[in-house]
Amino acid sequence: MRSFSRLVAAASILALFAVPFGVFAGQIATPVEKKVQVGTSVIHYAGQSLRFTTPVPLLVKLSPVSATEFRLVVSEYGASGPSAGYLVVEIYWENFGSDVYTGPPPPESLPFDGVLNTESGFTEK
């Protein structure tokens, strides 16, 4: 009987430690992949809003780097060939009022790849 009460006490202590780790794990967003159609669309991820204005369909991949950073990878989706040079894609970070990317549609072979910091608004490309 004495060993059973020790086992219950040990299990109770372990349960106390499991709660904070579970709460922390819930704060980091899970990776997502979205297809953005021609026009203007907004994607919400990790409490941030990114507005995409594009003349071609895009494949957008978002994944956590840390509790305050996430990776953004963008490329053309379903394109039959390179886009003409006069087409412009704009990715605007609404939370910080700044452009993340403005330029030609990034091809699948050379996607735009950046890490966005949700505290400072800094983008590492």
Image (cartoon, grey):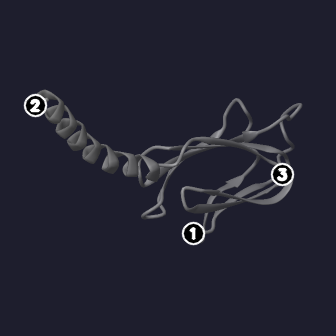
Which circle marks residue 87 in the picture? 3
Q: Residue at x 54, y 43 (%)?
A: 30
Residue at the spot of label 2: 2
Mark 1 against mark 3, which lies toward the viewer? 1
Q: Could you tell me the amino acid type at mark 3?
A: Leu
Q: CA distance from mark 2 to mark 1?
A: 58 Å
Depth check, front residue: 17 or 92: 17
Graded by Cα atoms within 10 Å as few (under 14), some (14 to 19) or many (20 or more), the crowding at tag 2 reads: few
Mark 2 against mark 3, which lies toward the viewer? 2
Q: Could you tell me the amino acid type at mark 1?
A: Asn
Q: Secondary structure at mark 2?
A: helix
Which percent across, then down, holds residue 46?
54, 56
Q: Residue at x 16, y 35 (%)?
A: 5
Note whether residue 92 is visible. Answer: yes
Q: CA distance from mark 1 to mark 3?
A: 25 Å
Closer to the chain start, of discs 2 and 3, is 2
Q: Residue at x 29, y 43 (%)?
A: 15
Q: Could you tell me the amino acid type at mark 2?
A: Arg
Depth check, front residue: 96 or 16: 16
Which circle marks residue 95 in the picture? 1
Which percent across, then down, holds residue 65?
45, 44
Q: Secondary structure at mark 1?
A: loop
